[in-house]
Amino acid sequence: MINRFHVHFSLLVCTVLEIMPMPISFGTYRPDWLLMGLVFWNMFFPQNINIGIAFFYGLILDVLLGYTLGMHALAFSLIMYVASIHHLRFKNYSIWQQSGILGLYTAFFNMVLFWLQHWFNDAFFQLNYFWPTATTMFLWPWCFWLLNRVRKERLRH
Amino acid sequence: MKPIFNIGPSIESRLFVAVFFAVTLLIADGVYQFSKPIRVTLNSLVYPIKFIASLPGEFLEESSALFVTQGDLLAEREILISEIMQLREKAQRFDILEEENAQLRSLMDAPLAPEFAKTIVELLAVDNSPYSQQVLVNKGALDGVFLSQPVLDDQGIVGQINDIAPTESRVLLITDIAHAIPVRILRNNVRLIANGSGNTNRLNIKYVAHSADIEVGDLLVSSGLGEVYPAGYPVGVVSDIIRDESKPFAQVNATPLARLDRIRYLLLLDTQAPLTGQAQQVDTQ
């Protein structure tokens, strides 16, 4: 069974990591923490953690980062749709395969964000926009291990 | 336990609803800016998250402030004293020039440049996703900060306030891709528009005719058009010009004078309430 407190607490930690102040040169490499958290919980509780929750956290992120409302909400919803469809397959992959698939998800996520920014704010394409994909892929095994411990901690009690 | 059958609406219908709401929000906010008046409320709702996120940085800053040696402090004091002496010497000349300028302007019947009340703010956080270059500062609606208030540092214009929470506010930097500032060249008063480039060290100057009189090293100051920034504050220096005749306009870049990558303290100009009585008279004329 799902413990909502653990799920939302870890998602809040992810949100905090997303907006944590960092030196200006590291900002480009900031991994998509919230995306990792959402994909992880969706993999184990696809009934409870899916598009609605993703939309909600996306909206919070929009307010926190001062974006046009709905930008992250839309991007997260789309990713969660793809992730929910494939959650069973994703769960059975090895951790390295998962990290590869997650790379595709984050690339798609950053792509959607770029398109939206392009339409609303005339952003020009820079390869920099895809650094989060690399760092997210790199951090996924550790993030998975940590979140899995949170999940199992729950099961034991 | 995992249910065998899905509960609730199918994943496709959930997606449809989410996308529908997101697109509605995007259009309402991106095109019609409906969230402008409620942003303060929204920001105060998520303030706890922001507060938690700012804790590690503050802790580091305070603990590093604890371990400053006396020697460092003395050296810093030395530098500050010499800086103050130099500035005071400049101020002596400036007072005389200002008076003279006011007299000359009154002879010509030109309006005086008003002086503004200034507030010093401190940097709280840097938000630099590639799409938005913004910083958070520690004064907000409760301190009388207002939307589009100009923000400077000791070298030049930094940006404007674009989002206000009760105790903090967000500054849109002049290098943000969504920002543009009307400028003129100090040397010959040619008027231009400097757009943000998304890099902290570059401004793109658009729509410069190939024949325009502009040179590398020209100082750009705010022109006062657009009614956000007061006239005459330094913005940047022209860094390179590419005159490719096959393109409709010359490609001109400038380097901002404000040190946007190492912001610590900033000045807010209160342009809504000029200081001197003289200036107010001019305003009512």
Image: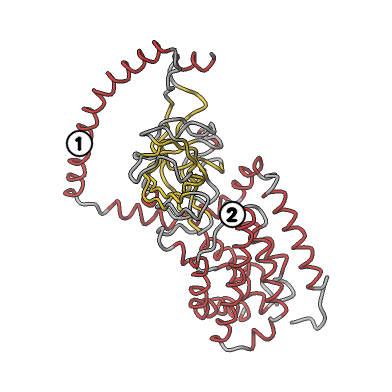
Q: In this view, does B263 lie to the left or right of A15?
A: left
User: Where in the figure is residue A103, as x and y percent of width and height?
Assistant: 56, 77
- Are discs 2 and 1 less than 8 Å apart at CB? no
Report the mark closest to the observer, 2 or 1. Answer: 2
Which residue does the image show at 42% across and 24% down from the upper left?
B115
Q: Which chain carries label 1?
A: B
Which residue does the image show at 72% across and 52% down from the upper left?
B27
List the residue tagged with mark 2. A122
Gap between marks 2 and 1 measured at Cα: 46 Å
Say which of B2 and B164 sits in front: B164
Say which of A52 and B49 sits in front: A52
Q: Is residue B121 left or right of residue A94?
A: left
Instruction: Name, please, the residue furthest toward the top.
Output: B107
> Could you say whether the residue bearing mark 2 is in a helix, strand or loop?
loop
| Quadrant where the image shows the N terminus of chain B | bottom right
Q: Which chain carries label 2?
A: A
Q: Is residue A153 above or below residue B80?
A: below
CA neighbours of label 2 inside 10 A, class few (<14), some (14 to 19), many (20+): some
Which residue does the image show at 50% across and 47% down from the upper left?
B206
Q: Which residue type does callout 1 highlight?
A: Ile
Q: Which residue type does callout 2 highlight?
A: Asp
User: Where in the figure is residue B94, as x and y percent of width and height?
Assistant: 28, 24
Question: Which numbered marker is on residue B164?
Answer: none
User: Where in the figure is residue B171, as x and y percent of width and height?
Assistant: 49, 44
Q: Is residue B103 left or right of residue A81?
A: left
Residue B26 location, quadrant: bottom right
Residue A101 location, quadrant: bottom right
List the residue tagged with mark 1. B81
Camera sees residue B264: no
User: Where in the figure is residue B33, as x and y percent of width and height?
Assistant: 67, 44
